[in-house]
Every structure is written in structure tokens, then in C-alpha cells.
Amino acid sequence: MRYIPHTEDDIARMLEAIGVESIDALFERIPQALRERARELSLPAPMSEIALNQHLGALAARNQSSDPSTVSLLGAGCYDHVVPQAINQLLLRAEFLTSYTPYQPEISQGTTKTIFEFQSMVSEVLDMPIANASMYDGAHATAEAALMAQRISRREHVFVARNVHPEYREVIETYLRYQDGVYHEFDVDPETGRMDLDDLKARVEDPKRVACVIFQTPNFLGVLEDPRELVAWAEEHKILTVAAFNEPHAFALAKPPGSHGVDICAGEGMGLGVGLSYGGPALGIFAAREKHLRAMPGRLAGQTVDAMGREGYVLTLSTREQHIRRARATSNICTNQGLMALAAAIYLSLMGREGFKELASLNMARARHALRAYEARGLGRRVYSGSFFNEFVVELDAPARDVIDACLDKGIAPGFDLGSVRPEWSRHMLIACTEMTTAESLDRALDAVEAAL
């Protein structure tokens, strides 16, 4: 798109049309000190292409990547899964490499069909009847699930388990703060690491005012939840249940949330062929029961037939969206994560049902091997008795932050410091193992932790 600057006459006419005397008047709500600081930005001179490449390369070299030469047992929401080379090659095709939203299905059948296939695969993985075209990330998807529950129930209170990812909880609380919602948290069972339903029931004063209960499986502590009791209690009080997740690979082995009867599933799909990257891109996944279809956020691709009886794909049920009536829209999410959704669809297609299950089994086996190695060498004790997938918590004999810092000096990331989430967890370290975790890398991590202790 060409850049054509506004003329002085253009600017004067626009200011007159909106009834403002000057451009500065448009920004008068911004504190004067901040505006002056913006004018005084000290930017360097332009660079040549060669100099710019060298500069960016030097900046990138300061990052620690997750390539085979490094050792990382970090998880906590982002997991180092394999990204088949075929994915990136297919994403580079000009037909797909675009931010265009397929408003005109007659010229966008390929894009719209890939969205439909993505939705179908997500529905199968989560065992849910309906999935949308994607969300920004897992935190955004979960927050939108809370708003959706409010719309359906016309209730304001939302209860979130404290073993839901802390960043998810922050985003949910922020969304509710400006949507007439009331945010609550309930505690974790200190023995199993699962949500404490007795604590939840004690905190709920009036079930008729509760919109939903949000839990995560596997939760932030790596423990797989058993939501059957929660779902039964919630259904009794007409409360919606929302299952969040970071690690969809777990559902290749464990029962997916949909099989337990939850109303909404929302979570992160970065591990499905998108790959790790500082800050993103991520992939929000969202699915729900069919009876809640019209309250769902985001776009929906549907299958239909044209006037000649030929199969076709369209964006359907658009009366939920902002381009119909923005003030009444269920959300303002677009299909801008469509490329990441395509990556996930290609990934799931390449893996297939059996491959997806085999990869999940490998994750589980390596995590259990790592836990046995920790305990055999006396480096840490398992904290929670609840079943886990590819992530677990150990208690160290020293603050986790000190151990991690000592290991990082050697280029090794042995895990995540849970003390950064709750002070009483200062000696707890969260460790993740995936198919990318080799026996050699695990031994190096164990040696580094032993030296730090």
C-alpha cells in the first residue's frame, strides 16, 4: 500500500468536520509531560540494509534459543515441541501467507476450508461439538470464555482455581473488571495439586449469582484434573464450567474436557506446530457446546452448498459479530490468527491420530524418567501426588531462584521458579519434558542442579 501524506488542506477539513481546532487538541487527554517526551525521542540515523542485518543479528545473538545445543526444561505454558519442516514450507505459500479475512467466500474457498478443517480437528481433540476459527492466545481465549459465560447466564460472579496459569488469571481479572464482573479465586489441594472443591463451595455464597467456574487441565502445576465432581455440582446449580489448557497434547492420552461434560474449552495451541518464540505468535483455541453456539466469540467457518449443489465453505452466523452491530457483538476478534490455525491444522494432519498419541506417550515417559532421576539422585522430592502429563513440581533443598540462576550461568534452564507465583513455593521448581528432551540434556540439567545445591 502506498503512503500518501495528508495535505494541509486535508488536515484542516478533517479538523473542521470533527469540530476540533488543532491536532494537539486531539491528544489533550494525554498528559503534557508524556507528549513532550514523545517529541524528544532520540532516534539513531537510518542504517543500510547490511548494517541493519548485522545490528539485528547482534541483538538476536543475546537470546537463548531452544536449539539442540541448549538445555531447557522450561514449560509453564510454553512447551518445546517439534515443528515439522513441512509446516513452514506450506505456510510460505502465497495463497496462505496473508492477514486477509475471507469475507468473500467465492474467492476464498481455500482459506475458508482450512479454517473449517482446523475447527473440525480442534473439536475432535477436545471432544467438543463446536470450535471457532481461533483466538489471540490461551489467556485471551479463557478470558473470552468468562465473558461468554456471563452473557449466557446473566450472572456476574466468576470463580477461578488458583492452579490456573497466573497470567491467565491476570487477564481474566482485567477483562471482568471492566465488564461488570466479579472475580474470585479458590484454592489448591496441597496434597494432590488439584483444585480444592471444598474451598470453592465454601466461598460460593449464592450459586444463583455465579456465571462459571474456570479450572485448567493439566493445570499450572502439571497435574491432570478430574472435573467430574465439579461438573455435577455446577450442573445442579446451573453454573457453567470452563476448562482451560496449555498443553493439548495431553488429551491424546487423558480424557479431553468435553468427555467430562464441560460447557466451554479454551486454551493455548502454540505447541501444535507454531513453535516457541519470544512473545508469540500464539494460538488461542476455543470450543463449546452446540447450545451455546450463538454466544461464542470469534469467527465460525461452515460447510454449505451453492445454488448448483456444489460443496462450499463460508463464514457463518455472522450476526454475532462486530461488523453487524458492534455494541451487541459477542467479541471483536478477527481471523488474524488464521495462519497459526493453519499451522496447527497441518501439524495435526501430519501427526494423525496415532502419531499424536505416540508423541504424547513419549512426553509422558520422559517426564516420568526425569522425576525418577531427580528422586534417585536426591535432588528433589515430588510435591503433588496427582497424576501428571509432561510437567511436574519438585521441592529443592535451596530456593529455586538461586538454583536456576546458577544453572543459567552454565547455559542451562532447569525449570521454572514457582516462588515467583506464590512466596510459599520458593523452593518449588516446575519441570517440563517433551519429545525434544534427550537423555543427554536431562543429565546435563541434573548435574547442574546438583552442583548448585
Image: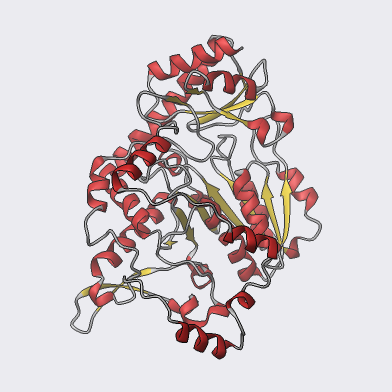
Residue 163's x, y, as percent? Answer: 64, 41
Residue most extreme to the front: 45
Q: Give the position of the C terminus as an image quadrant.
A: top right
Residue 373's x, y, as percent? Answer: 50, 14
Q: Is residue 192 visible?
A: no
**Residue 374 or residue 201, whichever sits in front:** 374
Picture quadrant where residue 428 is located: top right
Residue 239's x, y, as percent? Answer: 66, 61
Q: From the viewer's perspective, is residue 106 above or below residue 166?
A: below
Q: Give the position of the N terminus as an image quadrant.
A: bottom left
Q: Residue at x 64, y 77 (%)?
A: 25
Residue 282 as seen in the image, left or right of residue 327: left
Badge count: 0
Q: Residue at x 33, y 42 (%)?
A: 51
Q: From the viewer's perspective, is residue 372 above or below residue 187?
A: above
**Residue 154 or residue 44, whichever sits in front:** 44
Q: Is residue 20 visible?
A: yes
Residue 207 as seen in the image, left or right of residue 171: right
**Residue 340 or residue 25, whichever sits in front:** 25
Q: Residue at x 47, y 57 (%)?
A: 136
**Residue 107 or residue 58, whichever sits in front:** 58
Residue 320's x, y, as percent? Answer: 49, 76
Q: How is the image coloured?
A: secondary structure
Q: Residue at x 42, y 46 (%)?
A: 270
Residue 262 as seen in the image, left or right of residue 287: right
